[in-house]
Image (cartoon, rainbow, N blue to C red):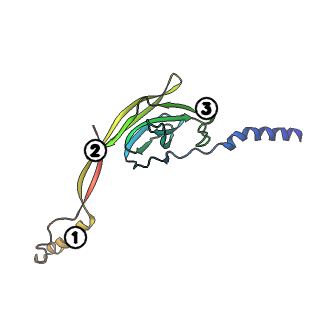
Amino acid sequence: MRQFLSVLMLGLALLAPAAFAEDRPRAGLLWNQSGLPSTLPLQVKTFPGKDYVLYVTDPETDRAVMAAYIRGGEFFRLLVPPGSWTLRFAFGSDWQSEVDLFGDQTDWTQLDAPLDFRASTARRHGHVVTLIEQNGRMVVADAADQTFCQIASWRTTRHGWDRLRDQIGPLLAGEGQDGLRGNLLYLDQDLKLRQILCG
C-alpha cells in the first residue's frame, strides 16, 4: 500500500506542471487594440519546433497594439493596420498562457527597425518576415516587401446571363425579333476587385 501511494504521489507531481498549462491557441489573431482597420498583409515564415507570439508594437510608445499566435512551420498571414510598426516575437515550445507565454523558457527577438505598412490607390504594401535559428539564437533572417496590386474588372452577373438567355431563347426558336429590339443593350455587370502579388 505504501508503495502504491508513493507511485501515485510521484505521478501527481509529474502531472502538476501540465495542469497549469493551457492548450496551444489556434494560429491567428489573439487581440487587436489598435483602433484601426486591419487591411495590410504581413506574412511570417518559421520552422517547426517552436511556437511564437507576435506583438505588433508602436515604436513611439512601445505599446503592443496587436498580438497573434504562430505555430512554428505552418503558413501564417495576418492583416495589420496601416502605420509604422515594430515586430516583436516571444517564442518557446511549452505554451503556458497568454500572461506566462512559454514559462521560464520564453525567449524574445525583434526586428531592428520598424516596418512601414501602407496603402495607395491601387496597391497594398506589406512585408514577409522570415525567422531562423542561428548559432542557438532565433534571429530575423529577412524582412522583404510584399506588395499586392488591386485590379478592377467587370464581371457579368448571373442575372445578366439569365436575362440574355430569356431574350435570345425565343429568337433561336424561330420566334419574332420584335420583343428583342431595345432590350438587349448590355449584360448586367458587377465591379470586382482582384489582388495579385506585384513588384
Q: In what quadrant of the picture does the C terminus appear? A: top left
User: Is residue 185 shown above or below 177?
Assistant: above
Observer-nearest of 45 and 123: 123
- Tell me which corner region of the image, top left, top right, bottom left or bottom right, holds residue 19: top right
Asked if residue 45 shows in the view, the reply is no
Q: Residue furthest front?
A: 61
Q: Which residue is mark 1?
A: 163
Question: On the picture, is 182 further left or further right than 54?
Answer: left
Task: Determine which of the numbered discs, if any, sits on residue 136 in the image.
Answer: none
Disc marking residue 120:
2
Q: Position of residue 122 (x, y in %)?
A: 26, 46
Q: Mark 3 — residue? A: 105
Alpha-carbon distance for marks 1 and 2? 37 Å
Q: Residue at x 23, y 66 (%)?
A: 160
Q: Residues within 10 Å of mark 1 (few under 14, many from 20)?
A: some
Expressed as whole percent of the image width and height from the top left, the position of residue 93 reads: 58, 35
Of the two numbered discs 1 and 2 in the rendering, the one whose residue sits closer to the viewer: 2
Q: Earlier in the sequence, mark 3 or mark 2?
A: 3
Residue type at numbered disc 1: Arg
Give the mark, 3 or 1, whose residue is nearer the N terminus: 3
Residue kind at label 3, given as amino acid type: Gln
**Mark 2: which amino acid?**
Ser
Q: Earlier in the sequence, mark 1 or mark 2?
A: 2
Circle 2: element type: loop
